[in-house]
Amino acid sequence: MKLNHPFFEDLVGTLNRELLKPNHNDLKSLYLKWSDQFSDDLKLLSDLIKKESLSVSQKIPHTSVLNGIDLPTWFGEFENKKIIFLGIDPMRNDRDFNSVEADISRDVLVGTPYAFHIKAFRENRTSAYWQVIRELAKSNFVYVTDIYKTFFYTDETKKIRSYDYWNKAEYSNHNQNHRRLLVDEINLIEPDLIVTFGALAYKVLTNQKYCPKLSQSIETTRTQIKPFTHERISQSKPIQILPLMHLSGSTRGHHLEDFFNNNGMKYSDRNDKRNIAGYLYGQIINDMIKKMS
């Protein structure tokens, strides 16, 4: 993860304004540490801040627990075709907090989407996602972020998680804060393609009430954002959108098998940790990017 890309300083400023209160240099130091240790850091979610360090624009309830933040990360050379991968949120659990003796009410665990900055995660828990990113970063610039940069449960009952809270009618205006930050990121990166993982990421990005059935051919599900009709995205050209299923265990294997079959590929979910699915995702996206050239 290189820090000398032209968008970096503006990104840090945006994150300071919309997400975190730590000063500019503190945030840069965190990225520098991750960059230096990217190859061999085995510590799990050991970066902590206090909840009061979160920006008020995140609208975190004071009773929240298991708070987490994921900061965007990126791979590859910026002069290549640009792809944004869009997940949902930085989910945390009791085990994550217990492992670093963090306070579930006062502390916030800081990481990256899919914990790509941690070798143990890249090689195990999120290896399928890493397979996609690693393959694509060989010839593209890949930026990975979440729709919601923050995660929490509203209280210790853990019945309501953050994105359900924000999508309640009385709090739905809070979603605009997250959309504003996401649009800022899109303007900084100016992607050729945005890949969404899961229905929620697609719906929030496109402002659509429904998501197409994700096991269909990509010729049916792919779409685009036309900047002149979509908020304040500054690009002059339309941005291609490709919605894909999650590669986590929450996606049933037969749905992935249907997807690859409908896209002319053979895949069996048996005895696969989804790494093969990740590799095939990479092939599909690479082919799509080449056709855009």
Image (cartoon, rainbow, N blue to C red):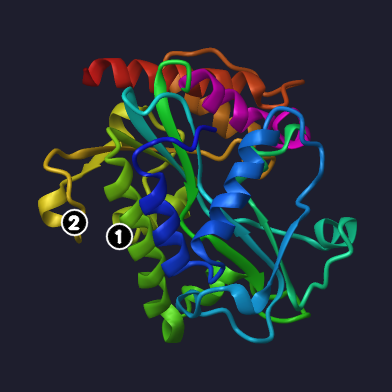
Q: Position of residue 227 (x, y in %)?
A: 15, 49
Q: Position of residue 278 (x, y in %)?
A: 57, 24
Q: Residue at 50% of width from left, 32% of height from top?
A: 2
Tell me the CA gap for discs 2 and 1.
Answer: 9 Å
Picture disc at residue 17: none
* Residue 209 image-quadrant placement: bottom left
Q: Which residues are magenta?
A: 120-136
Residue 265 appears in the figure: yes
**In front: label 2 or label 1:** 2
Is disc 2 surrounded by few (<14), some (14 to 19) or many (20+) residues within 10 Å?
A: few
Q: Position of residue 21 (x, y in %)?
A: 53, 71
SS type, badge 1: loop
Q: Residue at 60% of width from left, 74% of height from top?
A: 53
Could you tell whether 150 is left or right of 221 in the image?
Answer: right
Is disc 1 surrounded by few (<14), some (14 to 19) or many (20+) residues within 10 Å?
A: few
Tell me which amino acid carries mark 2.
Answer: His
Mark 2 lies on residue? 230
* Residue 184 image-quadrant placement: bottom left
Q: Are marks 2 and 1 in contact (CB under 8 Å)?
A: yes
Q: Residue at 60% of width from left, 51% of height from top?
A: 29
Vertical arrangement, residue 22 with respect to residue 279, above or below: below
The residue nearer to you, when weighing 106 against 240, is: 106
The residue nearer to you, when weighing 41 against 88, is: 41
Residue 89 appears in the figure: no
Vertical arrangement, residue 165 with respect to residue 216, above or below: below
Q: Earlier in the sequence, mark 2 or mark 1?
A: 1
Tell me which amino acid carries mark 1.
Answer: Asn
Picture disc at residue 207: 1
* Quadrant holding the C terminus: top left
Residue 100 magenta: no
SS type, badge 2: loop
